[in-house]
Amino acid sequence: MQKKIEMRKIIFATQNKGKIKEVSHLIFGRDIQLISLLDINDVPTIVEDGSTFEENAKIKAKIIFDKYKIPTMSDDSGISVDQLNGKPGVYSARYAGENATDEENNKKLLYDLKTLPEPHLAKFICSAVYYNGKNFLTSSGEVKGKIISTPRGTNGFGYDPLFIPDGYDVTSAELNMNEKNEISHRAKAFKKLINLIIQQTEQL
Ligand code: IMP
């Protein structure tokens, strides 16, 4: 008789549709049922007041695990620009103010870089964590590149239309999902994290 494979339920603590698409794509074929915060009612308010990506990712995972008692993955990510001393960094999502749209954040970034000489070197950073009520598993990923002065492309989200990864002549928003998942900071962090989760469960 064939053994029935139990799907492992994991909450992905985000409402960001771009992130949900990317991570769903990465776990395809694994025995994981991913539940996002868009699938759940009564989501608690999360204040991301950590000073690093990892601290913020841990805050999100713990709040969501404590409420639903389901193992939770989360990430915190952003873009860090050399000429702006690492800004927007952990403030990437709200660079142009609380509840700013991607377009408003992109406009502010271009405004801040307007008087500075090219190239505007930058990197995307992602810290990914998993919390099961006992311990945290953590991993991270980076992708280096540069910011251009005119947005290009409609895929992806956030700062993707302004970012050309090293070794490419198109922006992240001109890459398709498979291409972005080959190189992105989030893909690097989550590929490692998913392997750690599987290893940890095998040891139980
Ligand atoms: P978080 O939800 O607090 O991790 O905020 C991440 C913010 O960083 C997003 O709202 C985007 O502005 C930016 N960001 C993170 N990852 C990406 C990416 O893959 N592409 C474009 N922008 C990103």
Image (tube, grey):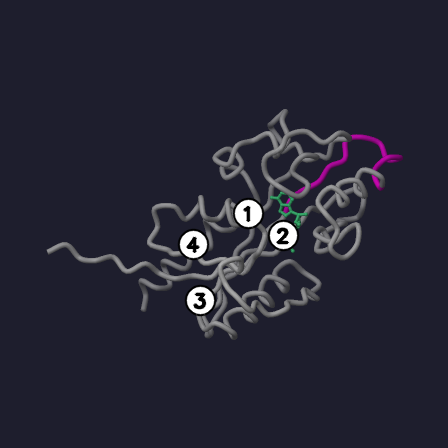
Give the x, y percent position of residue 124.
64, 44
Task: Check disc 1 and report the residue beneath it.
Answer: 186
Q: Earlier in the sequence, mark 2 or mark 1?
A: 2
Quarter location, residue 32: bottom left
What kind of element bears circle 1?
helix
Task: Check disc 2 and report the residue beneath it.
Answer: 77
Q: Earlier in the sequence, mark 1 or mark 4?
A: 1
Q: Earlier in the sequence, mark 3 or mark 2?
A: 3
Give the x, y percent position of residue 155.
59, 35
Instruction: Confirm or reject: label 1 Cβ below 8 Å from ligand 1.
Output: yes
Quadrant placement of the N terminus:
bottom left
Tell me the kind of residue under disc 2. Ser
Instruction: Confirm or reject: label 2 Cβ below 8 Å from ligand 1.
Output: yes
Please state the extent of the stretch shown in magenta in the rendering: 112-124
Task: Check disc 3 and report the residue beneath it.
Answer: 71
Q: Are marks 2 and 1 in contact (CB under 8 Å)?
A: yes
Please name which of the two marks, 3 or 2, marks the residue nearer to the observer: 3
Q: Which mark is residue 194?
A: 4
State the separation of the CA atoms marked 1 and 3: 19 Å
Please name which of the two marks, 4 or 3, marks the residue nearer to the observer: 3
Is 68 located above or below residue 139 in the figure?
below
Question: How many C-alpha atoms fall within 10 Å of the one at disc 1: few (<14), some, or many (≥20)?
Answer: many
Is 8 located above or below residue 143 in the figure?
below
What kind of element bears circle 2?
strand
Tell me the kind of residue under disc 4. Ile
State the separation of the CA atoms marked 2 and 1: 8 Å
What kind of element bears circle 3?
loop
Horizontal side, residue 175 vs residue 192: left or right: right
